[in-house]
Image: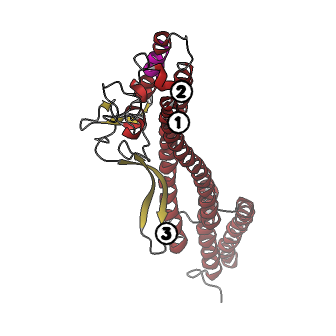
Amino acid sequence: MTSILTNNAAMAALQTLRSLDSKMQDTQARVSSGLRVGGASDNAAYWSIATTMRSDNMALSTVQDALGLGAAKIDTAYAAMESAIEVVKEIKAKVVAATEEGVDKNKIQEEIDQLQQQLRSISESASFSGQNWVATGADTVTQPEDVTVVSGFIRDSNGNVSVSTTSYSLDATTVDGMTVLFGGDANGLIDYNSGILGSLSSTFDTVVDWDNDGATGAGANEIAAVSINTLNITSLTTAGMQEALSFVEFGLQQMTSAAAALGSISMRIEMQEDFVAGLTDSIDSGVGRLVDADMNEESTRLKALQTQQQLAVQALSIANTSSENILTLFR
């Protein structure tokens, strides 16, 4: 039946055209944004996962910055400790040289004085971002202080998030485990009578008054303040010589141990930096697989839809023209 009130062919062509226009809009949105899942309405599950992982990646990016800051602090402390070790080696050599008969101990002491000043200079300068891991600290002369650097961002299987840290102890009190050149008082200022260079066991003060306090076996023994120009050369050539070597060597061992601890933390942070960088790339890649559009596929689909749209417009035009043909029956 042919009717001028109802044109079924035109309605069918129009419905097809509307459907193609809707698909065209979706495809154009994917092409312009590059995303197959641009919002929750596209795929709620994938969109939720992608949003969560993108937020985690932002946190990981901050962790990378924190790792860089932590690495800088540790590298500064390690460089200071390494330089201090070289200076103490020189002091050790000067003390040994003072045992030789006929040498001017006052001249040697002048050299030692300069080396001791260098130790203080190294300790005072080893600061990064307001933190000094080889000197000062909050009251480290009475108890060790733990300092930390951020090392990771963790999301467990239950969705709980946390930040992991790596700690290092600033210890100016433990005889066999000191990790700082000088400790810090309650105000955070350097206490030059504490730490590896400022105090050692009194067992090294039994033969010779190394700290020059007027008595053996009393007070702290300080590499940073040892004086040889008032010592008895006879005692130095016998038991005093051995005590001198043991005294300085003990300090070197403490400093070497502290440098090794700093070096191991630095190595771990470097490995963690590499891991975080790789993890960030993996998360980006995983999110891309979930939500990124295949541009080859989308471009092909867009070409096809454009062709179908042109055909639908032509079909609608033909359907509308068929109604006009009815006019010829009334001529």
Residue sitting nearer the eye, 282 or 47: 282
Q: Amino acid at mark 2?
A: Lys
Q: Amino acid at mark 3?
A: Ser
Task: Find residue 206 and report its image quarter.
Answer: top left
117 part of magenta stretch: yes
Q: Are marks 3 and 1 in contact (CB under 8 Å)?
A: no
Quarter containing the N terminus = bottom right
x, y (%) of residue 186? Answer: 24, 38
Q: Which residue is mark 3?
A: 48
Q: How is the image coloured?
A: secondary structure
Looking at the rendering, the stretch of residues picked out in magenta corresponds to: 110-118
Q: Is tag 3's residue or tag 1's residue first in the polypeptide sequence?
A: 3
Q: Are marks 1 and 2 in contact (CB under 8 Å)?
A: yes
Q: Are marks 3 and 2 in contact (CB under 8 Å)?
A: no
The Cα atoms of the two marked residues, 1 and 2, are separated by: 8 Å
Q: Amino acid at mark 1?
A: Glu
- Farthest residue, direction left: 186
Q: Which mark is residue 92?
A: 2
Residue sitting nearer the eye, 84 or 2: 84
